[in-house]
Image (cartoon, coloured by chain):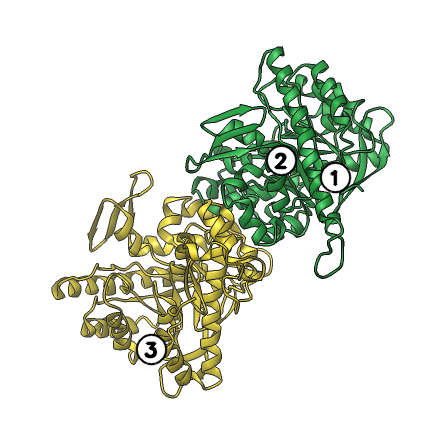
Chain colours: A green, B yellow
Amino acid sequence: MAQIQFEVVAECPQTRARAGLLHTPHGTIETPVFMPVGTQATVKGLSARDLADDLGVRILLANTYHLFVRPGPELIRGMGGLHRFMSWPNAILTDSGGYQVFSLSGLRKIDDRGVVFQSHLNGDLHTFTPESTVDAQLAYGSDIMMVLDECPEYPVSREYARQSTDRTVRWAGQAFGHYRQRLEQTSGFMLPGPGVPQASLMGALFPIVQGSMFADLRRACASALLELEADGYAIGGLSVGEPRPLSLAMVEATEDILPRNRPRYAMGVGMPAELPEYVARGVDMMDCVLPTRNARNGCLFTSEGRVIIKQARYKEDARPLDPACRCYTCSRYSRAYLRHLFLSGEILYAMLATRHNLQRYLDIMREIRHAIISEQYPEYLRSVRSTPVEAGGS
Amino acid sequence: MAQIQFEVVAECPQTRARAGLLHTPHGTIETPVFMPVGTQATVKGLSARDLADDLGVRILLANTYHLFVRPGPELIRGMGGLHRFMSWPNAILTDSGGYQVFSLSGLRKIDDRGVVFQSHLNGDLHTFTPESTVDAQLAYGSDIMMVLDECPEYPVSREYARQSTDRTVRWAGQAFGHYRQRLEQTSGFMLPGPGVPQASLMGALFPIVQGSMFADLRRACASALLELEADGYAIGGLSVGEPRPLSLAMVEATEDILPRNRPRYAMGVGMPAELPEYVARGVDMMDCVLPTRNARNGCLFTSEGRVIIKQARYKEDARPLDPACRCYTCSRYSRAYLRHLFLSGEILYAMLATRHNLQRYLDIMREIRHAIISEQYPEYLRSVRSTPVEAGGS
C-alpha cells in the first residue's frame, strides 16, 4: 500500500514537465510545488496562519538534523508530532539530516554503519544511521521522509563519488527494510478516534539519487534505487557549488530512469529563473532557503527583477515592492517603509520581506502549473528564458 | 476649536476612575486605553493588520526622537505622513522626544532655548526646541502630540526640580504659541480630495506635568499648564526609578487640578497590576514598552501569573500559554513550542509572544472599562489587589 498517491494530470508534449496532484495524509498538493523551508519547526518570520491561509502553502519542509538536536524527536513525539507541535495543518516533508551533518557539524565520522557527529549547538555526540533517521522522522510524523544519504561536496573524485554513491544505495536499502518493518508493526493497530488504520498515516519514504556530477553514477544509482519501489524519488547533491548547467544536466541524466508515475523531488533548488528549468526536466517538487534567507538579507524577488532594499534609490520610493503582486506586503507597504524597517533592524522587515518572496515563488509555481495544464509550457519557457524572472531592472 | 474631543461616559463614585470616548482624526478610542509602543514606526513583531484587526488596537505610540534621527520627519511628510508610511489606519500619539534625548543620546546640552544632542545612531548633532518638536510631529501627522519637556532623572534636588519644571512650563507655552500659529496658517486651506479643512486634521497638543517627586511642584506645574487650555494633559517623569507608591502619589497630587473633561495620559506606565491603580487615580491613557519588550525577553503575562518561558518546567508543557486567553498564540500554540522557539532564537517567538502580551494588556483594559461602566470598579480594584494580575503561580 502506498503512503502517498501521485496523479499526473497533464504532461507537456515537448518538455518533460508535468502537472500533478500529490495526495498525502495531510491534504492534496498541486504539483509542481515549491516547499518553503521551516528549519526549526517554523518558517522564519511567518506564522502557520500566514503560511496556510494567506500564502496557500500546502506543504513545507523541516530539517531532521535541526529538530533532532533541538528539541529532539522524543519531545516532538510526546507533543503529538510535528504537525501539532508547530500547529501546521498541511503536509510536512523532512530531509534525512545527512546534508546538515556534513555542512554544520564540526566533527563527523562516516563509516558504513552511519555517521557520528557533534551537535553544532553544544558539542554533544550523536549517531545517525539509516534506521535511526527513519525513526526520528516517524517521531515527527512527517508525511514524506527521506533516507539517510551522503551528500558529497563539489568537486570530488570519481572514485570517491562511486564509493559514496554505493554507500547511499546500501543505506537506502537498510532504511527501507527498517521502514517496512515499522509499517508492519503499526498496521492492524487502530488510532483512537476516527478509526483510521495508523499505517495509513505513516509517511512515505523517498530514496535519494546521488552520484556527484557523474551522469553514469547517477544513472546507476537511480536504477539501483528503483528496486525499492518507493512512493517517490529525491535527487540530491545539487546546489553544492557546481555550475548551474551541470545541476540541470544531472537532473536530466536520470529523468528517463525514474518512474513517470512517481513524484520527483529536486532537493535544495533553486533561484526563481531555475524553477521552470527543473520542471522542464521532470521535477515535481523543490525546496530552497533562498526566498526566505534572501528576504531577511534584503534581497527581494519581484516580477520586475531583484530589489536590494537597502539601496538609496528606494529611500523615498512610495511604490509597492512589486506592483503586480497581491501579497499583504505589496498591498499595504511601500519600498521606502521596507527600507526603513530593514535599516532599523526591525522584526517586521523580516516578516514582510519573507511573505513577499514566498508569494513570488508560489506565484511562479502557479504560472508554471497553469502553463503545463493549458498546454503552453514550451511558450512559457521561451518567454521566461528571454526575460529571466529574477533579472531585469526595477 | 478642539482637535480631539473627549466624552466621559461613566465615572466611578468612589475612585477617580472614569470611562470615556476619545474622538481623534483617526477614529474613536474607548478609554481608559493602553497604547502599544511602535518606536520606529512599527510595533516590534506585529503588522498593522495584526494590531488593528486581530488585537483591536485603536491608538499606538511612536517616538519622535527615533523617527527624527531615522528616517527623518521630512521623509515621513513626503511619504504622506506616518499613518500612510506605516500603513496604520487608526490613531497615533507621538511623544516629544525629550525623554529619549536624555536617556539615549551620548552628548546633550540643555539650555532655555532647547536641547542640542548627538544622534545615538551616527553621532550627528541635532537641536530640539519647543517649536521644532511640534513641527516634527506635524510632519508625522500625529493625532496627539506632546510638548518638549525635560524629564529629570530620579532623584534630583528640589532646587533642580524647580528650575527644570519652570523650564518645562515655559517650553510648553512656547510650543503652544507655535502650534496655534500653525493651526491658523493651515485653517482655511482645503485638503485635496474629501474637502475637509486641513486644520481639523491637525493633531492635538498635550502639555506635560513634571515636578519630579515633589507634590507641590507638580501641583504648581499642573496649575500653570491649565492656562494653555489644552485638549488633554500628560503626566511625565514617572517610572524613572522611583518606588512605585511614589509614582502613584505623584499622579494623585494633580488629579484634582487637571480638568475632568480632558483626557489625562500617564506616560510610560506600567506593569499589569499597576494599570487599575493609575485608572483609579483618574488616568485615561497609558503606554509602556513592558508588554512588548518583556515578550521578546521571554517574560509573558498571563491571567494566572508570569511565565518565564525558558524555564525547564515548560519543556514538555502542551498547554496554551494562557488557557483563558483568546489570542492567536494561545489558540494555536503550546508553551513547549514557544519555549522551543525562544531557545532557538526564532522570529516567530517574538511575533507570538508580543501578540499575547499585548492581548493581555488590552484584556485588562477592557476589564477595567467594563467594571467602571457597570459600576463595579471598587469591587474590581479590591479583587485585583488581592490577586495581583501579574503575580500568582502557573
Question: Label 3: which residue?
Answer: B281
Q: Callout 2: few (<14), some (14-19), or many (20+) C-alpha neighbours within 10 Å?
A: many
Question: Mark 2 is on which residue type?
Answer: Glu
- Mark 1 lies on a secondary structure that is helix
Question: Mark 3 is on which residue type?
Answer: Arg
Cα distance, mark 2 to mark 1?
37 Å
Cα distance, mark 1 to mark 3?
59 Å
Work out whether residue B276 or residue A202 is closer to the camera in this orientation and state it: A202
- Mark 3 lies on a secondary structure that is loop
Give the label, 1 or 3, closer to the camera. 1
Question: Label 1: which residue?
Answer: A366
Q: Which quadrant holds residue B209?
A: bottom left
Q: Callout 3: few (<14), some (14-19), or many (20+) C-alpha neighbours within 10 Å?
A: many
Cα distance, mark 2 to mark 3?
67 Å
Q: Residue at x 36, y 56 (%)?
A: B134
Please determine whether, in this image, residue B261 is positioned above or below residue A317. Answer: below
Labels 2 and 3 share a subunit = no
